[in-house]
Image (tube, rainbow, N blue to C red):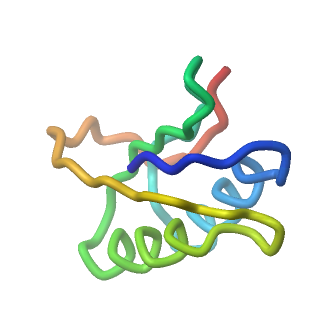
Amino acid sequence: MIGRVQGVGYRQATLREAQALELGGWVRNCPDGSVEIEAEGPFHSLNDLRLWCERGPVAAQVHRVATTQVPPTGVDWFEIRR
């Protein structure tokens, strides 16, 4: 998932949301200012995270969210990557 956000705590809020949904994976900022998220878990939880990403935290202005499928890695934790 990719969204364009800056300075609103998007990664930290994504971490909390993914942990609440019991998803594995990671979130990181990209050099172009977008945010990249890789998450795995039950379909309904992934869908809930995608819907959350479209809104983001309170101060976020999300312009676009794109999704792709990647093979699962089996991780059972969610982290912020740098």
* Rendered residue at 43%/58% (across/down): 64
| Residue for point 53% across, 46% down | 77
Identify the image quadrant of residue 42.
bottom left
Left/right placement of residue 59 relative to residue 66 reads: right
In the image, taking residue 81 as reference, residue 68 lies left or right, namely left
Residue 80 in picture, x, y percent from top left: 66, 36
Quarter of the image for residue 61 reads bottom right
Compared with residue 9, is residue 51 higher up or lower down, i.e. above or below? below
Q: Is residue 61 left or right of residue 22?
A: right
Residue 51 coordinates in the image, percent (x, y): 44, 78
Across and down, in percent, residue 39 comes to: 39, 51
Q: Quadrant of the C terminus?
A: top right
36 vs 27, left or right, is left
Residue closer to the observer: 17 or 5: 5
- Which residue lies at the image location 51% right of the left edge and 50% below the top edge? 3
Q: Nearer the viewer, residue 52 or 81?
A: 52
* Viewer-nearest residue: 47 or 25: 47
In the displayed structure, 43 sits above or below 30; it is: below
Residue drawn 66% across the image and 48% down it: 5
Number of dots carrying numbers: 0
